[in-house]
Image: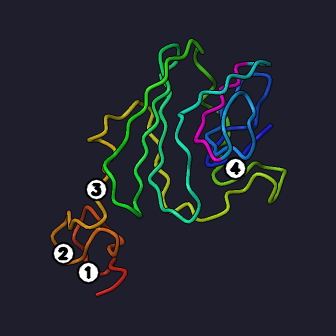
Amino acid sequence: TFGKILATDATSTAQGRWNFQIRTDQFGGSLPRELIVVLRPASSSLVVSSDFIVEPDTDYYLAASFLPGVEVVFYIQNLTADTPLQVITVPTTVGALPTTNTFFVGGLPGFPGSFSVDGVIDEVRLSNTVLSPGELRIANVNDDVDDDGLANNADNCVFVANDDQRDSN
């Protein structure tokens, strides 16, 4: 069972895989619209719940990290309301998963529309290590991090002042 897939490496079930998703039902004890990570080592499945409900028509910064055998960390910031970053840590005993699978964003391959995100995924960043909140490079939407005269929510290049990459003047 899947929800709306934000990111997945769902190309191999025999070796294991993972899904970062917003639930559409109550699979594995999660709630509808809850942000979860599903860890699938070999043939088993573990739902890691954030207890965070994603509200419709709201812009979010959403991220998750997985430290094998230790924890899954969810990073959530409501960009519409300009709230502070929330960090939710959930322990897990699931060990390492393959890192050579194909990476997909915004849906599940082979199922067009069925598990696709209802909205826009603006930016995707990958890291081979767990990042600290400071390394995530999240900024409040009303600030002007690069001092170019545009608030972050109107600036297409938030961290580097560059006139060619402005969304508006």
What is the crowding at mark 2: few (fewer than 14 residues within 10 Å), some, or many (at least 20)? Answer: some
Q: Which of disc 3 and disc 2 is earlier in sequence?
A: 3
Q: Amino acid at mark 4?
A: Lys
Q: Which residues are magenta?
A: 33-41
| Residue where numbered disc 1 is placed | 163
Q: Is residue 146 magenta?
A: no
Nearest to the eye among marks 1 and 2: give it: 2
Q: Is residue 123 above or below residue 93?
A: below
Where in the figure is residue 51, as x and y percent of width and height? 54, 35
In 3D space, how far apart are the residues under numbered discs 1 and 3 (Cα atoms)?
19 Å
* Front of the two marks 1 and 3: 3
Q: Residue at x 68, y 44 (%)?
A: 32
Tell me the CA gap for discs 2 and 3: 15 Å
Residue identifier under label 4 = 4
The residue lying at 47 percent from left, 43 percent from top is 63
Mark 3 Cα shell of 10 Å, populated few (<14), some (14-19), many (≥20): some
